Image: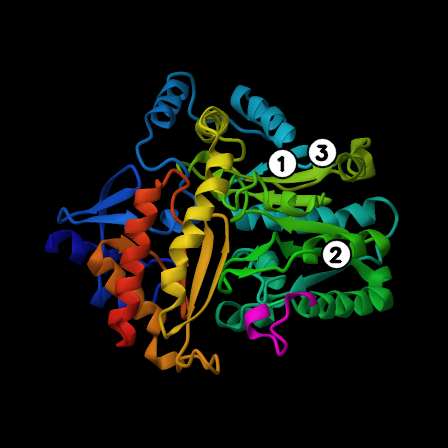
Amino acid sequence: MNQSFVEKSKQYLWLPFTQMKDYDENPLIIESGQGIKLKDIDGRVYYDGFSSVWLNVHGHRKKELDEAIKKQLGKIAHSTLLGMTNVPATELAEVLIKITPENLTRVFYSDSGATAMEIALKMAFQYWKNIGKPEKQKFISMKNGYHGDTIGAVSVGAIELFHHVYGPLMFESFKVNVPYVYRSKSGNPDECRDECLAELERLLSERHDEIAALSVESMVQGASGMIVMPEGYLAGVRELCTKYDVLMIVDEVATGFGRTGKMFACEHERVQPDLMAAGKAITGGYLPIAVTFATEEIYEAFYDDYNKLKTFFHGHSYTGNQLGCAVALENLRLFESEKIVAQVAEKSKILESLFHDLAALPHVGDIRQLGFMSGIELVQSKETRQPYPPEERIGYRVSLKMRELGMLTRPLGDVVAFLPPLASTADDLRAMVSIMKEAIQEVTGRAY
């Protein structure tokens, strides 16, 4: 390994979501990428088995995306969106509104999924104040939920490992259960769904007068282990929010732009949110652009004479960046010309069939999948669903073995996350699932 770069990385960097002691023991530095593969500084090649943290669509160095950035760079790299706009940001907004749920009519730009969610929370809070209902200040969030790492996003998140240390910084929110069928007592999707919706309705019936909004990931809770919601749950949440006059904020940061076999995951249940956050795959995995979508009703609550102080005082330096918007426009053109969403829906069936062999392994407890968003939960006992002791770090050890075998991913505890680039072929999927299978067999010590 190129020791000079390794030593520099150890000396100067502090990596996100990384215990640096782990990195020091197992360093990795990426030098380049091509298609759905990455190359490190020593020339080793790996499948990008998690789409570079869930955002790559067409693979790396996609010619059309490269050219879109170069073309825009010949005009301007960035100008502010504060009090003015620019050409690609305006064009992109029009395209986005045409592909989102029809009740969403306004686009507010930012630069990451967390900030997109932070914006949605602030919009929801101020909306009620602007229309004369300032008592609606509380939020409902979902247990095991994750919406990013800014303080507002953390406050409506509920993954103990990530969030507990920041408790004193967070505002309180009501937290309700989301169906986790594999870990439920009954194991029955319908019962699990109905119990969770009943719990939510009890809370709404008692406290709706003080609740501004509910935040929920769309169809899949990603960071908590790819927990796929049973049919009817998201639609049921929408019905309850409408019934009790609470805004519904849907987080499509991970699930949006084709990842689940629909352009947006809420389309699976024809859900139309009041506010929706999206990011990650919007630029094909190239540049940091995120968006918060709002209904016209919410937008109009902020539209007034300046001295009425209804303005939404929020913004970011690189909001609506021209390079990012230009590559996002080209990304969405490729979605249409290459029929990406339809391809993902079709190839998801292939992936589902490939998982059959994986499911037979004695320490694979559950496989959860929606489109190209999937998680393989490893357990000590398949019969009792007993998890491995945390100190064994089975998921982490499997991910290191996968790296050794030629594929990169990041585990979610003892859930192996598998989110390949949307351009992955059937042969690519077979190769990557084969690597996962071999790694799981070797680490759990029960090879067939």
The magenta segment is 181-190
Instruction: Report the Cα–Cα distance between label 2 and label 1.
Output: 27 Å
Residue 17 visible in the current orientation: no
The crowding category of the residue bearing disc 2, from other C-alpha atoms within 10 Å (few below 14, some 14 to 19, many at least 20), is many
- Residue on which the image places disc 2: 236
Residue 283 location, quadrant: top left
The crowding category of the residue bearing disc 3, from other C-alpha atoms within 10 Å (few below 14, some 14 to 19, many at least 20), is few
User: Would you say the residues marked 2 and 3 are in contact, meaning their CB atoms lie under 8 Å apart?
Assistant: no
Q: Could you tell me how many numbered marks the image carries?
A: 3
Q: Which quarter of the rendered picture does the C terminus lie within?
A: bottom left
Residue 142, percent across and down?
64, 64
User: Would you say the residues marked 2 and 1 are in contact, meaning their CB atoms lie under 8 Å apart?
Assistant: no
- Mark 2 or mark 3: whose residue is earlier in sequence: 3
* Side of 42 relative to 343 (left or right): left
Q: Residue shown at 86%/60% (left/top)? A: 209
- Mark 3 or mark 1: whose residue is earlier in sequence: 3
Residue 441, percent across and down?
28, 70
Residue 387, percent across and down?
44, 79
User: Would you say the residues marked 3 and 1 are in contact, meaning their CB atoms lie under 8 Å apart?
Assistant: no
Residue 421 numbered mark, or none: none
The crowding category of the residue bearing disc 1, from other C-alpha atoms within 10 Å (few below 14, some 14 to 19, many at least 20), is some
Residue 165 visible in the current orientation: yes
Give 229 or 136, whichever is nearer the viewer: 229
- Residue on which the image places disc 3: 102
- Mark 2 or mark 1: whose residue is earlier in sequence: 1
Instruction: Report the Cα–Cα distance between label 2 and label 3.
Output: 19 Å
Q: Amino acid at mark 3?
A: Glu
Q: Residue shown at 31%/50% (left/top)? A: 430
Q: Amino acid at mark 2?
A: Gly
Instruction: Report the Cα–Cα distance between label 3 and label 1.
Output: 16 Å
Residue 108 numbered mark, or none: 1
Q: Give the mark toward the camera: 2 or 3.
A: 2
